[in-house]
Amino acid sequence: MLRADEVAKIIEDMYAGEITVTEDTELLDSGILDSLGMIELLERLEDKGYTVQPTRAEKQDFSDPARIAELANRQNENGFN
Amino acid sequence: MIFEDTGRFGSKDACRTADKSISFTDMESLSDALAKRLCAYAGKRVVILGEDERVPAVMTACLKAGVCYVPCGGFVPEKRLETVIEGAGAEAVITTDACAGVHSAGIDAFTVEQILSMPEAGTRKTDRDEAYAIFTSGSTGRPKGVVVGRRNLENFAAWFSDIPAIRTVGDGTAVCAAPYSFDLSVAPLVHMWHSGGTYFYVTRGDIADAVRLYDALGASEGSLLVATPTFADYCLCDAAFGENMMPRLKTVFFCGETLRCKTAKRLFERFPGVRIVNAYGPTEATCAVCGSEVDENCEGELPAGDVSEAAVDMLVNSDGILTLKGASVAKGYCGGERGGFTGDGEYVTGDRCEIRGGKLYLHGRADRQIKIRGYRVELDEIENAMEGLDYVAGASVSVIKNKEGLPMFLCAEAAAKNGTKEADLKRDLMKMLPEYMIPKAIKLTNAPEMNENGKKMRTFAESR
């Protein structure tokens, strides 16, 4: 299971610690996850063994680390993927 | 001229978006009708705002009427639009669709319909050889307009259309997600004018929503994808992006930023047999000047062009800086600023490079210019914009890079008046700069002392 705080940490790492991200930090309207951010996040999730397919998700599934963790877990459940 | 008589391509689509289209026949008659009215602006510059399927027809009309067009895309912050209008000395704004913002710069503003209702202005000609002006980030703090002539455009068209991997596309559809304000869009325009291939324009709205984007790509029937590597990486995020989604895709033409071998390999996997061209060229030399076809077994650094096949001559000085010389080198900047133009048909790019085995390899910049998602960004322009705010005394912008060392995000530090909020500062920047130039995070420190004008400490930025 991927945890929300792990997602938050991945995003903080992407920003080399320049920003603080918690489990409920808003990521879309704030511009934190723009297209480049999305690419990098999905690549890093893949490195951790979680493949996330944006076409099988709603935009709002990426709105904060908790929802991203939920999405990654949902899409990577055995038997459902 | 390539933009003339495109009506010969008949009833097939000249330009399409996800939900609208215009045929070559209609583009020809619309551009003729507009040109007869736009002749009143011959020899002058006109801004085009919008991103619908009629924009190429308006551009064609401007070219026919001898008007230099300044494409600004569908959305541009109001202050930046004013800067562009002023910098270009534009005398009118043409809006093609409702999504384009209304402006108030005090010059003529028309919709396409309003122009059509004007009386014909005859066939006034001009000797000025200006096709378009595209604005790019300027290190002085203001965007600078690169003026490209018709001869430059012709030279680019001849070079581009003769690339083997482009020839193989024939009159197939070219898909491009770059806004009209970004000169990567010149490639699908040329493909449309020259080869009769449909230009499928991916809008900002499509890109913002992954599901809409993949729907648009699936409906595009694209044979040629003209993109920045970042756009391809974005598409590749989803396994659905592959030959089933775009069964006709033959060639991907990349330009605008460094192409990673990883991206190319993933494309070869998803689209077996696809041909990939990694191209290079600054706006100052008309879209692209050289390209290399990527090998399926590529490793490490990819070449950005075959020097002997380039659209211009390429010279490397003793500092390793690339200079371009030839018919693609643009006319200069709008305001007459010299920049890298030497005045005798040469442009000093500022790109560090090496030519090895007849191929061009790029090694970054000699200055503070970077590429974010293919967009050219001068860090100085952002710092100047921040320091232009009366409550900011000093600013410094830094770049966060990914594993491959390519720029990913911008962050900033600003010394500002006590009590300044990050969100307010960002909001003020949004009025002046395009979205890709806004730092993701701005650390605020108190300005030690602000003088009466609020201005003082350039030293802050210099202490980086």
Image (cartoon, coloured by chain):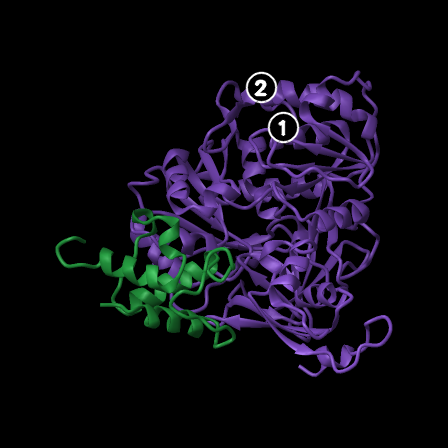
Chain colours: A green, B purple
Residue bearing the label numbered 1: B57
Q: Nearer the viewer, residue B242 or B206?
A: B206
- Give the residue at x 47% y 46%: B207
* Residue B297 appears in the rendering: no
Q: CA distance from mark 1 to mark 2?
A: 9 Å
Residue bearing the label numbered 2: B26
* Residue B377 appears in the rendering: yes
Label 2 near label 1: C-beta < 8 Å? yes
| Chain letter of the residue carrying label 1 | B
Locate residue B165, reporting x and y percent.
45, 45
Residue B308, which numbered label?
A: none
The secondary element bearing badge 1 is classed as: helix
Q: Nearer the viewer, residue B423 or B385?
A: B423
The residue lying furthest to the front in this view is B419
- Give the residue at x 26% y 68%: A2
- Give the residue at x 50% y 71%: B401
Which of the image's four quarters has the N terminus of chain A? Answer: bottom left
Locate residue B273, reporting x and y percent.
32, 47
Q: Nearer the viewer, residue B232 or B294?
A: B232
Determine if marks 1 and 2 fall on one subunit: yes
Locate residue B431, reporting x and y percent.
68, 53
The secondary element bearing badge 2 is classed as: helix
Q: Identify residue type, mark 2.
A: Asp
Badge 1 density bin: few <14, some 14–19, many ≥20, Cα 10 Å:
many
Q: Identify residue type, mark 1.
A: Ala
